[in-house]
Image: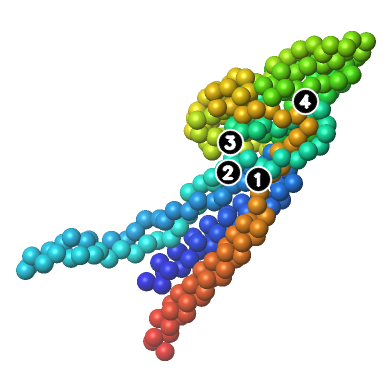
């Protein structure tokens, strides 16, 4: 009936609106360091079974196909794409990127992340007033483990395996200050986005596997580089066009169903 068509088309408009929101957010963050794009996944809804396939008649002839009418679509989830973004050379010693798998660990409130930890791919770092290495954003989250750079340090070097060396004023030989650790997850797509370029652990992601960079599948660290967003603007614009056209076609389905119902309503005239 036309009523089912109305509901199916309206569910499509709702799902497509969500897809549009996802694409718009991707494009809005195309210049966000370490940002990972998402895509909306769709799934069909329940079906009305008007005839079951495989039923037989009196002559034992079997029905080869069934008669099922779907009731629309919905967004089943948003899928994170952890494809690595392009490297950008900056020349800043506190700009670092992960070449490969893994996340930097940062300290957050216990209410935000399990164990007071969150994870990020953004390596744009800075120093706070206490000389601690923090994320260069509006919150200044501390990198974990906490690294405090001496006030008289004249140079900072970060090796591929995450060891931090500083050269102190008056000395020629650099001294090792700390060791950065990276974390990987069995299912990184199951991480939860909480803003600030941060992800937190969930039951779907599994627990973090933390350790030295370059070991057990973890990537290496490159100093003086940042990882750009992995958003492909061309693909996102094409997706916007596809979404818009699908929206128009489903709007036309609503119009057609409305005209059918109007015809039925006017049969007595």
- Give the crowd class for mark 1: few <14, some 14-19, many >=20 residues within 10 Å: many
Q: Position of residue 242 (x, y in %)?
A: 57, 64
Q: Which residue is mark 1?
A: 230
Q: How does the figure colour the protein chain or chains? A: rainbow
Task: Please tell me which residue is depicted at 84% across the width and 18% down the height of the picture.
Answer: 131
Toward which corner of the image does residue 132 lie, by quadrant? Answer: top right
Q: Which residue is mark 4?
A: 134
Q: Which residue is mark 2?
A: 81
Q: Position of residue 233 (x, y in %)?
A: 67, 55
- Give the crowd class for mark 2: few <14, some 14-19, many >=20 residues within 10 Å: some
Q: CA distance from mark 4 to mark 1?
A: 23 Å
65 sits left or right of 142 in the view: left
Closer to the N terminus: mark 3 or mark 1?
3
Provide the secondary structure element on which disc 4 rests.
Answer: strand
Q: Marks 4 and 3: which is nearer the front? A: 4
Q: CA distance from mark 2 to mark 4?
A: 26 Å
120 sits left or right of 68 in the view: right
Q: Tell me the number on the disc at residue 192.
A: 3
Closer to the N terminus: mark 2 or mark 4?
2
Residue situated in front as seen by the camera: 73 or 41: 41
Toward which corner of the image does residue 199 lie, by quadrant? Answer: top right
Provide the secondary structure element on which disc 2 rests.
Answer: loop
Closer to the N terminus: mark 2 or mark 3?
2
Residue situated in front as seen by the camera: 82 or 134: 82
Q: CA distance from mark 2 to mark 1?
A: 8 Å
Q: Position of residue 187 (x, y in %)?
A: 50, 34
176 sits left or right of 117 in the view: right
- Give the crowd class for mark 3: few <14, some 14-19, many >=20 residues within 10 Å: some
Toward which corner of the image does residue 81 lie, by quadrant? Answer: top right
Closer to the N terminus: mark 2 or mark 1?
2
Provide the secondary structure element on which disc 3 rests.
Answer: strand
Q: Check if mark 2's residue and mark 1's residue have beta carbons within 8 Å.
A: yes
């Amino acid at each position: 009936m036309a009523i089912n068509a109305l509901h199916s088309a309206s569910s499509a408009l709702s799902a497509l609106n969500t897809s549009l929101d996802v694409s718009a957010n991707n494009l809005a963050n195309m210049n966000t360091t370490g940002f990972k794009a998402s895509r909306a996944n769709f799934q069909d809804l329940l079906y009305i079974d008007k005839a079951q396939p495989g039923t037989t008649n009196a002559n034992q002839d079997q029905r080869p196909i069934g008669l099922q009418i779907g009731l629309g679509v919905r967004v089943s989830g948003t899928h994170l794409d952890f494809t690595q973004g392009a490297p950008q050379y900056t020349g800043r010693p506190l700009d670092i990127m992960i070449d490969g798998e893994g996340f930097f660990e940062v300290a957050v409130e216990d209410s935000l992340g399990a164990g007071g930890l969150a994870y990020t791919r953004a390596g744009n770092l800075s120093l706070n007033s206490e000389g601690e290495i923090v994320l260069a954003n509006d919150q200044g989250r501390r990198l974990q483990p906490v690294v405090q750079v001496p006030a008289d340090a004249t140079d900072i070097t970060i090796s591929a395996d995450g060891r931090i060396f500083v050269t102190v004023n008056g000395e020629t030989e650099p001294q090792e200050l700390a060791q950065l650790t990276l974390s990987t997850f069995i299912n990184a797509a199951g991480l939860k986005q909480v803003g600030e370029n941060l992800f937190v652990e969930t039951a779907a992601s599994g627990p973090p596997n933390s350790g030295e960079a370059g070991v057990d599948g973890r990537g290496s660290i490159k100093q003086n580089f940042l990882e750009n967003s992995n958003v492909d603007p061309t693909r996102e614009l094409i997706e916007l066009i596809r979404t818009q056209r699908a929206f128009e076609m489903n709007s036309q389905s609503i119009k057609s169903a409305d005209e059918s119902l109007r015809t039925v309503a006017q049969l007595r005239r």
